[in-house]
Amino acid sequence: METIFELPLFGVFISMAAFVFATMLYERFRKVMLNPILISVVLIIALLQILNIEYEQYNIGGQYLTFFLGPSVVALGVLFYEKYIIIKKNFLPFFLAVLAGGLMSLVSVLIICIILTTPELITRSLVLKSITTPIAIEVSQVIGGLPYLTAGIVVSVGIFGNAFGADILRFLGIKSPSAIGTALGTASHGIGTARAIQISDLAGAYSGLAMCLNGILTSFLAPVVVEWVL
């Protein structure tokens, strides 16, 4: 059995099987808590724990799926190109919204961590929760955080945004696809953008651009804001 777990096909198979099953479950019951991304993660973690499989063994195959994350992000440029005229007309409010969202993400985490007297090392690791994983890991090293902890919180925030973000925004009365897409991309990066694409092409285009812009802005702002506050 040990040999089977170490085959690249094993990680790919259980990842795809978990997502297909989770999607079928969501289509059947249409409940927010049954979000396919959330359920897939829970199923994979449960399976690895039950079978006592190390993450490194699973990731022998899982890394091949991770490879396609890069091309999928680049492919978001197609949506941006198709909606370029619309986005261009609204770029200033869009830019200000992403800037405000990125700053609020940094400041809110810092304030909460200070109130809870969180160790500084943990605070520096959590503050980058809303930017895409590759950028967050690199910036985490710059500001003195723990890259692996940063990666974990980034993924967790993305899953939460994918599962609940759109519904929370609608509950607050926000119905504009561009506003929803911008919020999801700014707060929940790539995983949130996957949810935005399901809403509409316009939401997906705004979300993808917001994810990229917030990543760039935060990579410059985070070291300054964190050092100033801490």
Image (cartoon, rainbow, N blue to C red):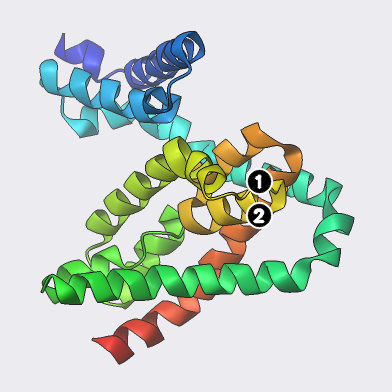
Residue 102 screen position, x and y as percent? 49, 69
Type of amino acid under label 1: Lys
Measured in 3D between alpha carbons, the distance from the residue under mark 1 to the one under mark 2, in whole angstroms, is: 8 Å
Picture quadrant of residue 122: bottom left
Residue 175 has which mark?
1
- Is 184 placed above or below 42 here? below
Residue 178 screen position, x and y as percent? 70, 52
- Is 89 placed above or below 166 here? below
Name which residue lies at 43% across and 27% down: 32
Of marks 1 and 2, the one in the foreground: 1
**Is 196 on the left or on the right of 191, as rendered?**
right
- Is 156 placed above or below 41 here? below
Dot 2 alpha-carbon crowd within 10 angstroms: few under 14, some 14 to 19, many 20 or more: some
Name which residue lies at 13% across and 23% down: 49
Residue 200 screen position, x and y as percent? 71, 37
Picture quadrant of residue 161: top left
Q: Is residue 208 visible in the rendered structure shown here?
A: no
Query: Element type at marker 2?
Result: helix
**Is 71 on the left or on the right of 5, as rendered?**
right
Mark 1 vs 2: CB contact within 8 A: yes
Camera-side residue: 127 or 147? 127
Residue 103 has which mark?
none
**Is 102 on the left or on the right of 139, as rendered?**
right
Name which residue lies at 71% across and 71% down: 93
Q: Is residue 6 visible in the rendered structure shown here?
A: yes
Q: Quadrant of the C terminus?
A: bottom left
Query: Element type at marker 1?
Result: loop
Dot 1 alpha-carbon crowd within 10 angstroms: few under 14, some 14 to 19, many 20 or more: few
Name which residue lies at 80% across and 65% down: 90
Q: Quadrant of the N terminus?
A: top left
Per the image, the residue denoted by label 2 is: 179
Type of amino acid under label 2: Ala
